[in-house]
Image (cartoon, helix red, strand yellow):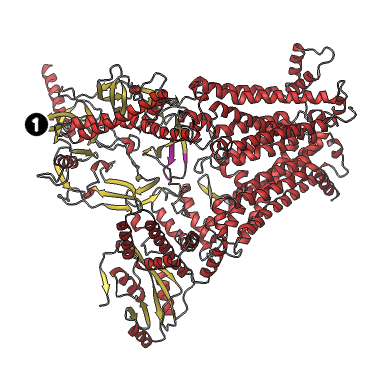
Amino acid sequence: MRLVCSEFVKLFSNRLFIICFALFFVINAAGFYFFTTSDETYKYELSLSDELENKLSYYLDMDRDDAAAELSELKEAYSIASNIQSASSENIDPTYVTALIEQYKSENPKAYERAQQLIEEGFSSGDVYVTDLLYEKFSYIDEYNTFINDMQSRTDSQLQFSIFSKPGTFAYNNIEKTPLDFEHLKGVEITPGFDLGINLSTTFVLTDYLLLILVLLVCIALFSLEREKGLTALVKSTQKGRHHTMAAKLVVTLLTVAGVTLVFYISNLLTGGVAFGLGDLNRSIQSIPEFMNCTLKCTVLQYLVLWVLKKAFTLCAVALILALVFTLIKSTNITYIVLVAFFGAEFCMYNFIDSMSPVNHFKYINVFYFLSGNELFGKYLNLNFFTHPVNVVWIYLLFLVLCALIIPPLCLIAFSKQGQFAGANVFANLSEKIRLRIHTFRGSTSVFKGECYKHYVSSKVVIVLVLVAGFAFANFTENININYSLGADVAYAAYLNRLEGELTPEKEQFLEDEQKYFDELNAEKEAVTYDTTLTEDQKSAQITAINNILDTRGKGFETVMLQYDTIKAVGEKLNITPYFINYTVGKRLMADASREWNLFALFMVLIVFTLSGIFAYEYKRNMKRLICAAQKGKGRLVAAKFSVALLTYSVMYVLIYLPYIINFIKTFGTDIFSEPLVFLEGFERLESSITIMQAILLEGLLHITISLAAAGVILLLSNKLKNTVTTMIVSTAVTLIPCVLIYFNRDLRIFSLLMNNKLWVMALLIGVSTILAVIFAGFTYKNFTGKSLRRRRNGT
Amino acid sequence: MKHIIKKTLALILAAFSVLSIFGGCSNEDIQNKGDYDYTKDCQLVNSDYLPMSQANIAKCETGYYVLANKNIYYVEGETMQATPLCNKPNCMHNDDSCNSNIGVVDNISYYDGSIYFVESADDEYNFEGSNLIRMSADGSQKETVFHMDLAPDEWIIHRGVFYYTVRKYSIDENTGMENINDIDCYIYSYSLDKSSSEPKEIYFAEEVQRDAQISELMAYGDNLYFAINGMKRDNKTVNISKRLKMNLSDYSVTEMLSPAGTGNYLFTPMYLDGMLIFSSGDEENGKYIYYKTDFEGNNPEKFFETYEHENIICDGKYMYVDNYIALNIQRMATNDEPVNRKERYITVYDSKLNKVDEFSLGDGSAKTWFLLPIDDEVFLFGGKNDNGNFIFYYDKSELGSLNGKLWEKTFCLNPESQTKSSNSNKTGAISETPPSGSEELVNMWQKAKDKDYGVKDSFQSEGADAEAGFSVKLSWEQDGGTVTSYFPFMEFESEDKAKEFMSEYPYALRSGKFLVLLGVESVPEEVHSMLVSILDGEPIEPIDGAQFSGEFFSFS
């Protein structure tokens, strides 16, 4: 018990953990509230919540079928009324309006009459929305009953087909099993209600990622810090033996993770309840359409309890896995690589393996799947194990049991038996021999060279740079030529070869001539069609030839003319000469959402990995006091460290971003760079005539300042935390979680700011990032040297 | 000695003669029947208009796979019933999570127990090519077999090899407008049976460049047939259009020329009873000549002749000659109803050119080239209309008895009959709780429920002084819409009470003290029949509203 208490004290006296917990909690709560309540669709529904509630209560008091029937009629009436109103108000032929009214009268007189009443009484779009929404909710009752009650008949129907009826196949076994798993749900009462709060609260992804980071921090604090500080030997020499110590650590880990999980997810539910309402918690979970395939016979409240417990257990299992990794692997760098590889692989498998792939097991037996919103309990799924369908919930439970049974004993054994310090690797002697041949220390070396040695050689950053250089080479040599598969695209490219650049009178004349050419071609086609002097074969041949031209060159020209109209309008708006820019090429350079994210995320990972140890290096080796007694003072030392960091940063930035640009220039030339960005498709809203080159430099500057700010955070953390792996983890949270969150939203890219004419936002971000970078650098300096950056009045 | 030799020779000759009689080998009949195996060979459209790239149907050992809109359906051969290719009873097949939903795909193919199709690998900003996807026969698994940098124009799978055509445009600084349509066309092959296969270029259309195209790709036996079209590479005013045959053993290419020496090509081979039928540009007395060859495409002989623009397809057993185009051209030529217009009909011949039957399809737009023969059992067709996906077929066992009549289609999948007006357990809330009331009433309810009627344990009827009751929900199509009504079944205290109620509400049916209120003067005959049967305690099978005859029962 005392051991447990002392481990709790260790954990909660770790300021980083407390700060992160508080910070993440605020970010999560604020983020959830902000992202959900600012969404236009949700906002609209929120604005109608009173009316929705009143109408819902009214219809809930009725017989379900009667309510559905009445809503159906009302929906139809609103539809007719809306159509009549809009037809009457627009400039539409009155004859058409009359005919429309007659049609409604004859097809559905009752609904038409009701529609007339609604028009006379007046109605709003909100009324229509409410009715449509309630109609969907009440229709769902029938839909669900049909779904459940027809399950067996669907099964029987499917088994009549030979491809599904071969015993011993997965298809057959799955079809047989499924209705049995849903049998107990017959007769479940479906009660319409408000579902938005439940759906949003249970599918907010940010919480999962923040909690993963917190779990990592807990494990670092309990399993890694002592080793980093050299206290393992002390900790291991406990009265009751090492097993008790490790057991205490595991208990504290699990309790903390469970507690933190409950706090976060319950906060989400409460926030969702306050903002949107959770509705009647006593209705069956299947009352919510998103849970139609849920096989749990429980109420909404019971489901939510189970859902929170699932999250807690999953994160506890993750914590156990991490504990094992930290216990088994002693090297910080390797630990980080293993963790990144593990979570990276899990993430990729979850998101990129197809649900019907033969290896979809990796998609579903996956930490991210277990953590995901309502997938596990909310959607029925069987996996194929040697033709036997096994429900994924059982697999999840097995996963928990295995984690609980296997990992703790392994941790106990590893902690007890293994040494806790990383020995020299197998190449250490060899590398030392090589080093001695290349270089022998003669006396002292400069501070900068010393820092370079520590960073590039001792911390192995040079290996990372070599790998990045390989990546750069691959980027540089990649074939980025455009493979045209459509003639129209080729035609467009050919036109742009001729037209690209400033719109001149000669080019406008060319367009006029081309338009005339196509007008004549179309006239010729029509003439051939009705030419009775030609045989069918002759007609067919001529028309085919004309169509070939129209389908390729013609379509390409249509695109060119649309572009022409656009650039003319933009040119007039900004009072500048219009430019033709090849859209296909331009978008590859300026609007490639995947490339922008990939490169930036990669860069973030690299700077986290390479810069985390800059200040922590000496602490790890207990050389801090020694190194601070430098001849030229700590300031010089910090400057050297900053220089090394900046050097690494610069080299990596160049290796990541430059090759593609060079490759692009090699492939497509440089003409495009001098053209105003506003004439590129998608950027028409820009109210500036900056060129593409200027835009690239601006984006580059933004990338640099943001990543410098991130680097500043990393260096500060490295100095404050005095621990490389902790720095890596926290830095990952700060830099990569936002990257992951915006991955799936392709509109959240830096080029989107240009598309939406948010140059001021870019400038602001550059300014703020620069200030932050300077501030972080300043704090790091101050922290390391103990001096303020400001001169004191007395000049000392 | 000489005598013995002569006798021996005579015996041998006699043996050959006997064998030739029983073997049925005559000069005219010497045909290579071929070894066409539909599970391994390219399953062909057998139409001289429809390229393989639009074939949305594939035959398998037990039935057919049909691509309708974005969904794959399986049609059981024996029963001709269709189902989405999804083995999840808990799936309603109406969203992207359904196994049968494969996205926007042009055509499908079946080979060696798996279904194949090509899907685009594009993303929004970069063209990422196409993937060849393999799907298991029961639709439970799918995987990417092979990635192509360009979308193929046409593709087939033949004896374990994926053949596909691509067109590569080239554009550079010197490309003028006149060179836009310069295209390099290729045929590639990729072995599906070898796991470490790489695509292999087996043909480059060197002769053509401007508007170049390789088309009509198909394969029979050991040969690949295709057409090349376009302007000559070194002289872009000269048009080239050739039909070629490639031997798949050595990839040698020969031209399929008409044996008449006219310089015309034989094109679009169709399979008919062990031989290949080719159309040609040869004319004789205003008729186009069709030729037949052996299964390897050799030894062409004149086979058939038709008037211009008759569309022919072959299904392996019969040849179908459709006069649709001829009718259209007549109509266009006169810009009005053509004089002496013939009726549209399709004539069926066997491989000996004996007329088997004649029929019409009724629907002017259902041209035969949309009827994919695949085999000699059905014409099968799948698609989508405003109501949803549909699949129908024409049963070829009826050939020989049509005699010019309309050939009726049979639906395997008809969206109009689904759910909207189905009276079988798909509408209304099934109530597990029986109504209160006498045992007789409960039995009535139970029997209706057992027959899968949509029942509920409550009823609504103003003015009815009934002791207990339940309702049955029925739907049917009427006046262009769907009518749905709840019919209350009521139990009165006594027969007299029921009669008293009926005197005020005459539009009802009564059986003793039990009554069902219709509320209207007339209802469809089928509704009346169903209600009467439930009232009598012997409910009939629910009849779907779409199947109603249109006859009405009227109280008057």
Q: Chain of mark 1?
A: B
Camera-side residue of B465 and A241: B465
Which percent across, then down, holds residue A421?
A: 79, 31
Instruction: Left or right? Give the position of B317 relative to B438.
Output: left
Question: Residue B41: within the magenta?
Answer: no
Q: Quadrant of residue B504?
A: bottom left
Q: Quadrant of residue B355?
A: top left
Camera-side residue of B423 and A586: A586
Q: Is residue A788 visible?
A: yes
Residue occupied by mark 1: B285
The amino acid sitting under disc 1 is: Asn
Which percent across, then down, holds residue B13?
A: 14, 25
SS class of the residue under badge 1? loop
Residue at figure coordinates x 76%, y 19% from the top left? A429
Q: Which residues are magenta?
A: B131-142
Height in image: A85 above or below B78? Answer: below
Residue at figure coordinates x 51%, y 19% from the top left? A666
Q: Is residue B131 visible?
A: no
Which percent across, then down, holds residue A669?
A: 49, 20
